[in-house]
Amino acid sequence: MMKNMWIFGRSNKVVIVVFTGVLATELLWQLYKRTRSKIPSKSINEVLFFSEESSNCRMHAVSRTPCDRSNCSVTQLRKLCAYLESAQQNLDVCMYLFSCEDLAAAIAKVFCRGVVVRIIVDGGMAENSACERRIRDFRERGIRVRMKKSEYLMHHKFAIIDRKLILTGSTNWTMQAMHGNWDNVIVSNQLALVKPFIAEFDRMWILLTTGED
Amino acid sequence: MMKNMWIFGRSNKVVIVVFTGVLATELLWQLYKRTRSKIPSKSINEVLFFSEESSNCRMHAVSRTPCDRSNCSVTQLRKLCAYLESAQQNLDVCMYLFSCEDLAAAIAKVFCRGVVVRIIVDGGMAENSACERRIRDFRERGIRVRMKKSEYLMHHKFAIIDRKLILTGSTNWTMQAMHGNWDNVIVSNQLALVKPFIAEFDRMWILLTTGED
């Protein structure tokens, strides 16, 4: 009887030791994978669409009240603003056409909070009065803007938030793009997508040193 | 001695049973996760950049010989063609400006192979002679093209390959975009990014039924 209990106790010990060992190995493996793959804990992959139906939402853009349309442009614009306003350390914007007041206000807001803001625009964009006003306003606030004057277009439409999240797509930051064109913006924190944009922005920023007023 | 061996043998059995059990559970868990998350077995996330430096590559575009520039436009263009030519069942293209001969040739090639090709373009694009020629050529080959005539722009620049892979970004499919502009194309098979584009293309295709000649 005593021997049986002893055997039973010993088996139990073995089970516990083995189980703890396997559990610890599994935890370490998961931890290693998390560190190794550098996958952000919360994955963000979202696509925002704008379409001609969005033009019907323009009328309630002032009140900022979203409607129940799947592509409501007011809802999409508010999402973009919220992403920009989520910046804590850095905000890099690289935009071909930039005249949208709401997005400019979001940038001004985070800049006032101490976020480091860098903006790259196309040189020819400044010929458009709405865009030119936006650039002048940024510079008057102390926000750094660099531009490219060339026969070719600085045609990117992307922003990087805290060097972790990319907003990019076909959409220029204009009222027509938000409230009429058929356009898209991808929002992603996939490192494989974010890292190349960071490298390209940094490369362009250095290259355009002479483009700063 | 015999008893010790029996105990040892029994412990060994327990270890094997527990280990096999844990291993089987782990394998089932991994299998469940793979099915549940629907992550493609081979993840594709790539960003192709075009830049003003790419204009220097235009001269060797005819020979299709890539150079060692990091953003060589011939290399990038060849990559885009290869992605298009990888289509086995479906190829959906939604493009604001489309005049690039190489990309059009890649589409014609897969269409000849029996791939179902659908193309959506902007109505105003047909006013550009280079783009108009491309559309006419597609239609003469029997490729279905639908377009949107409106005061707003059909400004998307994306393609979906086999309803699994998305190519999208700021880049129009023109020679200037490939060989001069500062532009980008994202290539991804992330379901969270691909699925919304499939839904939007299908929605537009139905909506533009009347836009087909």
Image: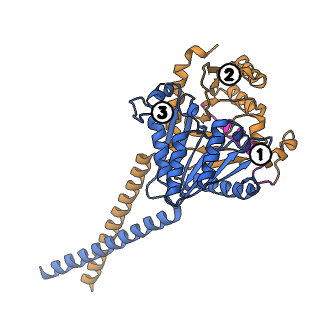
Chain colours: A orange, B blue
Residue displayed at 61% across by 39% down: A168
Q: Which mark is residue A166?
A: none
Whether callout 1 and callout 2 share a subunit is answered: no
Q: Is residue A40 visible?
A: no
- Mark 1 sits on what residue? B149
- Mark 2 sits on what residue? A124
Residue A88: image quadrant is top right
Q: Which mark is residue B73?
A: 3
Q: Is residue A144 above or below residue B163?
A: above
Q: Nearer the viewer, mark 1 or mark 2?
A: 1
Quadrant in which the N terminus of chain A is drawn:
bottom left
Is residue A66 magenta-colored? no
What range of the chain is rendered magenta? A68-90
Calculate the distance from the C-alpha at mark 3 to the C-alpha at mark 1: 32 Å
x and y, in percent, of residue A136 in the image: 74, 18
Q: Secondary structure at mark 2?
A: helix
Q: What chain letter is assigned to the residue under label 2? A: A
x and y, in percent, of residue A62 in the image: 86, 38
Given the image, on which type of amino acid does mark 2 rest? Gly
